[in-house]
Every structure is written in structure tokens, then in C-alpha cells.
Amino acid sequence: MAARLAMSGRRPEWLGLWPLAPIVLFLGAVFVYPVGQLLWLSVVDGHGHLTAFHYARLFTSGTYVKVLGITFEIASWTTLIAVGAGYPLAYLLATVANRARNHLMLWVLMPFWTSFLVRTFAWLVLLGRKGAINDWLLAIGVTDAPVPLIYNRAGVLIGMSHALMPIAVMTMLAVMRSIDRSLSGAASTLGARGGQSFWRIYFPLSMPGVAAGALLVFVLSCGFFITPALLGSGRELLIAQVIITQIEELMNWSFAGAVSVLLLGATLAVVFVYNQLFGRSAFNLPQAAPSVERPRSGWVGRLGALVAVRLVAVMGWICDRVGEALDWIRPIRADRPRATMSRGVLWVVGSLTLVYLAAPSFFVIPVSVSEASYIQWPPVGFTLANYQLFLTNPVYVAAMMRSLVVGLCSAALAMLLGVPAAFALTRRPVPGKSVVLAIILAPLIVPHIIIAIALFFLYARVGLVGTTLGLVLGHTCISVPFVVVTVMAVLTNYDERLDQAAGNLGANPWRTLRHVTVPLILPGLVAAFLFAFVTSLDELSIALFISGGTRPTLPKQMWVDSMLRVSPMVTAVSTVVLLFVTSIILIAEFTRRRLERAPVTTVDRR
Amino acid sequence: MTDPVHKLRIRGLRKTYGSVVALVGADLEMRAGEFVTLLGPSGSGKTTLLLIIAGLVQPDAGEVWIDGTLSTYLPAYRRDIGMVFQNYALFPHMTLYENIAFPLRMRRVAESRIREEVRRVLTIVRLPGVEDRLPSQLSGGQQQRIALARCLVFEPPIILMDEPLGALDRKLRQQLQLEIRDLHQRLGITVLYVTHDQEEALAMSDRICLMDEGEIEQIGTPGDLYFRPRTVFAADFLGESNLIDAVVTSRTDRTVDLEGPDGVPITATVAQAIQPGQKVKVLVRPENLRVLAAGEAADNCLRARLRDTILLGQVTKYYARLPDGTDVSVAQLTRPGQRRLEPGDEVCLGFDRASAVGLPLPESATRG
């Protein structure tokens, strides 16, 4: 083989895979190695001998098993709410005209890009004892005393499902948009009412999206600690909080490692069940197409399929009977147009969900200019004192600048690593492609808190704790999968014949890239960069550990202060972050639309 | 107002999308067992008409009668209409058995009957034994047959087909054209077929309904449309045509005397009301023109200068230009020892009165 290659004088094919080398080396160093090290720590004692001591403690103490139980319970409820309430919205978005979708999407993207922390503070404003909702409830006389809406499980669930629903909606939407619209028409000409056609055709075809969305939400929920810490009562202690305590207060690395293994193991188990049910790796999300065309294997899959078939048949039957009852009340007339009620209902439900997603964040704005010395609704008077406090506080200003620098640097680094990799993965035959993809996308699945303590442990030995470089590397590790996924999605839809045409017309590869490829995929590249930037801007887990005590990022500073007392100043900081991120999204969206209309990109890509 | 003869009656159907008029007021009737094709360029309203009949689009005005029942605003699932979609629209997550059983399940047919019926239609479309496969495991042509089987299984009064062969290659398309035609004749089903391919329309249809810009231009047998088009659009859209400018001098019953380019007298047949002095186009199909030998005579004779001769096999084509600059083509069967003609030669093109059709110019053409 080698001889033949040498004789033919061609470069061996693996040389063409160089674009993958930087990202693989990078993730090997700041992700695979440290996480592996942490897991290793959990099974050795102080002298380097294998031991099950930490696991024995984990399972015998009872506390941690209970915490794991609570974590799964809350994650399950969050998943149910985010996917269940997000489904009608995703369905609406998938079935409206393109123009309307572009407008509506903005209201999903806005909360998606807005900081978890800001949104949690917004819920404090809305749900507190002196919050907006209790204010209204008292005003209209529904209740005499404020209803406890936060510092309990309801508050945690509201906050977490609100935080994660945009991800669920966007994942489901990606799959729903790939469903052929003529199938519903076909079903109805074959005699299926709307309900039957939805349950028997649309719903099963949208299942891969539902499952992927649920998987992402569940996995992310398991690693959550911001919302439960700020909106919970203390009894909603999630496993991520246990890990933080073990490190921050007890410096017990081995035990934290064991808890991490537990969390990671649970996460992987969920991914495994997903694979069994849907016959496709969750890592293949970028090429998400309905996977149902492949027959399922394994008993879990067969059982799931059996249950699913029965379920949709029953749901279809129920809808049929309800429809018939409605027809009996209001008979169908062949001689006059009928108004379709279901569409109206869908719009109402979808719009309400959008309001739920987009509106709460904006409640921090009026409170930030209130004269009250604690967070309360309605705002009192008008003052910029909170902003003055914020902008004259050197710690906050330094933190803000550091967040911007880290964000820009890590986004740039993520692009440098991710874009070549995305090109190689979409355009070259990559041996062991699924393994490479799995490594690149693993930081999405592994809870960030685990990456954070793994990096902390690594950095402590090489002296990167508390450095900007350390933060940039850590943030790049979690934002680079987003870059790869986004750019791969754009490149998959890109007609490579355009490049061949350019080459044929005399452009060398560099000029082809510059004048043809990049202008066409520019909106995708811009989106990927902004995605990475905002991910870093909003990141708390890694910053919490490795920014050190003296050089915090903005989210960490806000977090540390709020742990002591939620002061009205955070509403001013939140407003600044909110407006900053919102204007970035609006600019990005505006640019995207401009670019799509600009002459250079009007080439028909279908 | 039941009407046992007509499977489909359409009265004054009108549909606009915003400011775009998709359908101007269509009337159409179909008898049982008929194969009618809606033919027209894209954007002519044929798919809109089909979707209204299927119940997937609601019209602004007009009536649809299916099998003697007023169905204008009935939802699709209450119409019992079979429809084959351009991309087949087979449910990708269901086996072929489940796909074909679907309409029967919706009608709550007993499972034992369903099994029988599925086997029956699979035999009809010559794909027995594929029940457990998934649509993606079949070729395009096979998927097309399954889509058809899924319609046949519940025996709808009409089957609608929206460019069902559009995605297939030419050879397979021709084979399936014959198969669909054969099924139509064997089973006596009533088919309304949409295509923009004129050859397909000519090959398959009992009648063709030619559409343009939301209006029905002409309905008739393939022969009617080919030999007796009523408009310039119809003449131009179907087959090859030579359209020659002329002015009416006088009319007697079904023939008109015209003055062609350079004042040449032409006689032609005409169907519509036509006034002396009116401008018309004269349609002569290439195969009805012939290059006259010296001394040979014909009803009509046009002088032209030859531009090119192309031997295509069984047919030889001559391209020539009339004195007023109109290009015409002549198609003649190729014969050995044919007179060799050179570009630039002056020739006489003859044609019979019966094969020339005078067509009044559309108002829009005189306007624009």
C-alpha cells in the first residue's frame, strides 16, 4: 500500500486531515486529559493505590444518593416542562411562512442568548414576595397575602425550564423543518382528520427532535446550580452544588471526582438509552434528519417502538372522536368556507410561550432605575444610583472588561480551531469520523461543572489558575463544539459544485475560498463567532473555579455578591448585559438578512 | 342535483393569493373512467386547481361537485379523493404495509380485510411481497407505484396525480406512463393528472385541459388540441408550430381567405368568429408543410429562403425564412434520392387548406 502510494507519487490521504489536528490536540489537553485525571483521582487513595473508598462513602452516607435523586427528579420535571411547552411553539415555528418564522425566531433567540444569571435575577423580580406577579395578584384581589413563588421547588422549575426551553425549541425545530410538508396533505386526502394526521404522521416524525431536545435539556439540567441556588429553598440541592462545596470548602478532590463520575455515568446512561430508542448517536445532531427510517434494534428499542405505535394510535383515536363530537355540534358545511380553529389555538399557545420566554428578562430594566433599596415591584421613583454604583465600582468594571477580553479571545480561538475542523469533517473522508466527532462534541454532553473542576485541578499544577489565558482555554473548550456544529450545518447545505466551478473558472483554492465560499457561508461564520462569544460571556462554572479569587469575570462577580445578598445593583448590571447581548443579536440578525439579500449571496443554493 | 354521469364538476373556481390571481374562474367536467390532464407552464394554476379539488386549498368562489356531491368546502378527509403527490409523500416511518393500510385504518376497516386489500393492490401494481419494507428501501419508480397503490386501495371516485413522474428519469417515466395508462384502462378509474410535459399529456390523456395564467385555454382530445387549437397559446404550447402573420380578407363558413406576408393569398380553416380586416396568425405544423418540386401545386404556397437542412433520421428538417422575416420549419420523411437543397436556395413551401388554422390574436397581444 505504502509502496503503491509512493510510486504513484500522491500524498497519503491522512495528510489531508491536518485541519483536525489542532482541535484534537487542544481538546486532548484541556478536556480529555484533565477529565480523565479527575475520574482517576476518584479511584485512587493518597498513595496511588486503587480504592473504592470514595464510592463506598458516596453510596453509604445516603445524603448523596438523595441529592442524586432530587437532581434527577428536578431534571426530569424541567425536561418535561421545557419539551412539553416548547413543542407547540416549535410546531408553530415549523409550519408558518418563512417571513413570519424569521420574526418569531428572534423572540426565541433573545432569551437563548441572554445570560442564565440575568434571567434568574429577572425571576427574582417577577416572582418574589414583593415581585410583579404577587403585586398583580394582590391588586386584583385573587389573594390577600403574597403567594410563595420562589425559594421553593416551583421557583426552581420555573427558572430552569425557562432557561432551557429555547434549546429544546431550537432542537425540535431543526427536525420539524426537515419533515416533508406534503405528508400532512397526503394523510388528509387519505382520510385522516387533523388529529389523526398529527399523531400518526407528524408526531412520530418529530420524535427524534423531541428526544434530542429532551436529552440536551436533561443533561444540562443535571449540571445546573445557578437557578436552584438563587430560586430554591435550600432543599433543592442539586449534585453540581455538592461538587462545588466539596471543592470550594473541603478541597476534597477525590470525593468530588467520585461525585463527578456519578453525574457523568448518569448522563452517559441517558445518552445510551436515547441511542437505543432512536438508533442514532446524539453526537450526530448536526445531520439531524428523522432517524426513524432505520429499523430499531435491541429490546429497549423494540419495546419503545411498540409503546409508541400504541400511543399514537390511541391519541389519534381520541382526537378523531373529539373531532366527530365537534362536527356533531357544528356540522361541516360543503357550501361555505370553514374557519380552522386548531390553527388559532396553536397561535395563542405559541404566542403565550413566546411571551413566557422573552418577556421576563425585561422586568429587570424598570427595577434597575428604582429608588428602593431592595428588589421590589412596582419600582419607586427614578434614579441612576444603581448604575453609578456599578460603574464606579472598580471590581465590577475590571470584571466587565475581563469578560469582554476573554469572550473575544476565546471566540477567536474557537473559530481558529473549529472552522478548519468543520471543513475537514464535511468535505473529506475522515477515518474514524464518529470518534473524532464524539471527542469534539463531548464538551456539550459532559456537565460543565465537571470540566470546570478538572481544569481547576490541572491549572493548579501548571500555574494557570487566575489567569486570562486559563479562562480563554477553558471557555474555548466549551464553545468550540458549537462552532463546529454551526459551521458543519452551513457547509452541509453548501453546494460544493460552486467551488468546483470557481476552480474551473481559474480561481486557485485560496481565491475560491475568499471570493466564493466565505461570502456564501459568512452568515453562518458570524453566527458561530457570536455564539462562542456569548457562551463565554455567560459562562459561570469554569469562571467560578479558575478565575481565582482576585480576577473574576462579570458573571462570577455577580454570583459571588448574590450569594451574600441580592442587591438592587445586580439589576443594573443585568440590564447592561441584557441590552448588550440583545443589541448583538439584533445586529447579527440584521446583518444576516442584509447578507442574504445582498447580490453576492443571491445564488440559489438549493 | 345529483349527477351520475359526471365524477367531477367544477363551476367558476376562483382563487387569489394576496394580489396574485392563481385561478380566474375554472369550469371542468369529468365523466366516469375518463383520463383528463391539466397541462400548462408552471404558474398556470393547474396545481392550485388540483389542490382545491383535493380539499387542501379553499377557493374564494365557485363550486366543486365530486361524484354528485357538493364538496367545495368539505375538508380533504371527507372527500374520498385519492391523490398521488409529486414526491410520492409516502410516510417514511411506516412500512409499505402500514402506508397502504393507512386509508383503510382511517375508515376503520377490519384488520383481516385490510390484509386482503393490501395484498390485492400490491398485486395490481406488480410489487407483491414488499409489505415489510420501508419506503426508503425502494427505488423512485417503485415508490411511485406504492403511492398509487395507497390510492387504489380505498377505491376513490377520482384519483388526482400531481406531476407524479416529474422526479424520474426519461426512460422510467415512459415506462410508468404506459403502466398508469394500462391501470386506468384495466380498472376503469377516473384520473385527473397534472403535468407540464406536453408529450406526457398527449400520450396518456383522453382529454387535455390546457391552462395558462390561471385560465383554462382549451379543453379537448389530444387530437383537438393538436389539430384544432383555438388560441395562439394552445398552438404554440403543444407540439412544434409555424405561426404566420396574416390579415383576413373574406370568410365563407369554416374557411377564410387571408393575405399573408408579401401579400401572398392563403386559405385556411377557422373556428372562431372573425372579421375581415382582423389580424390573425396562421398555424401550420412542420409536418404539414412540404417543399414543392418544380411544377408541383398546393392549396397554399409560400416563397421562402432556405437556411439549413438537418437530417434527423426518419425525418429531415428544413429551416427557412419567409420574406417578412418569420422563421418556419418543415419536417419531411427522409427518402433516398431526395433532392439536395442548399442554404440560400429559394423554395416554395406548400400546404393544404385543411391543415392551416387561422387563429385570432389574443387581446393581450394587441394590447401589449
Image: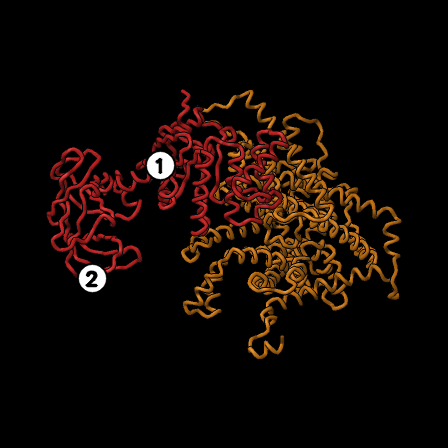
Chain colours: A orange, B red
Q: Which mark sits nearer the N-terminus, 2 or 1? A: 1
Q: In this orientation, which residue lies closer to the viewer: B103 or A564? A: B103
**How many residues crowd mark 2 within 10 Å: few (<14), some (14–19), many (20+)?**
few
Chain name for mark 2: B
Residue occupying image coordinates x 43% and y 64%: A501
Q: Give the image quarter of residue A602.
A: bottom left
Q: Which mark is residue B340?
A: 2
The CA span between labels 2 and 1 is: 41 Å
Q: In x, y percent, where is residue B164?
A: 45, 43
Please tell me whether mark 2 or mark 1 is closer to you in this view: 2
Do we see residue B147 in this rendering? yes
Which residue is nearer to you in this view: A487 or B21? B21
Label 1 marks a residue whose chain is: B
Q: Amino acid at mark 1?
A: Arg
| A233 sits to left or right of B367 | right
Q: Is residue A412 visible?
A: no
Residue B212 in percent (x, y) is at 33, 40
Q: Which mark is residue B207?
A: 1
